[in-house]
Amino acid sequence: MVIALPLYIFLFLYFLVLAIFAAFVLINFYHIVGSGTLTVMSFTITFFTATLTVFTLYETYLLLQGTNWQETIPLFNSNWITNLFPPSTL
């Protein structure tokens, strides 16, 4: 018996993290504009964060470009236990 997890599950989890991050970015922009605190420092930090985010997404795209998302990762294989103590031939 083999229990395996396809790689695309991790891709969906990555998209979920990106969606949560995007929600926080939108909330951050709303608070900056809504409270009227658009200063040079807040603009600099926001620009730096946005630049770092775009760079990270681009590098992730480059690294994952040739990935076969249908490949599976075995979590448990019963052969690992049954082959642990092979029968001895006397």
Image (cartoon, helix red, strand yellow):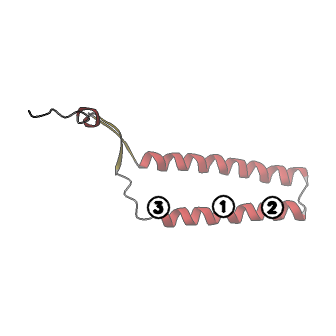
Compare marks 3 and 2 and give the one earlier in the sequence: 2
Picture coordinates of residue 67, whole percent (x, y): 40, 60
- Amino acid under disc 2: Ile
Pointer 2 residue: 45
Q: Residue at x 36, y 57 (%)?
A: 68
- Label annotation for residue 64: 3
Towards the viewer: 67 or 12: 67
Picture coordinates of residue 6, whole percent (x, y): 38, 46
Within 10 Å of disc 2 (Cα), the crowding (few <14, some 14-19, many 20+) is few
Q: Is residue 19 above or below residue 3?
A: below
- Amino acid under disc 1: Thr
Within 10 Å of disc 1 (Cα), the crowding (few <14, some 14-19, many 20+) is few
Q: Is residue 51 above or below residue 13?
A: below
Alpha-carbon span between mark 1 and mark 2: 12 Å
Compare marks 1 and 2 and give the one earlier in the sequence: 2
Within 10 Å of disc 3 (Cα), the crowding (few <14, some 14-19, many 20+) is few
Compare marks 1 and 3 and give the one earlier in the sequence: 1
Picture coordinates of residue 12, whole percent (x, y): 49, 47
Q: Residue at x 28, y 37 (%)?
A: 80
Towards the viewer: 56 or 39: 56
Q: Residue at x 75, y 64 (%)?
A: 48
Quarter of the image that includes the C terminus: top left
Pointer 1 residue: 53
Find residue 1 and report its image quarter.
top left
- Amino acid under disc 3: Leu
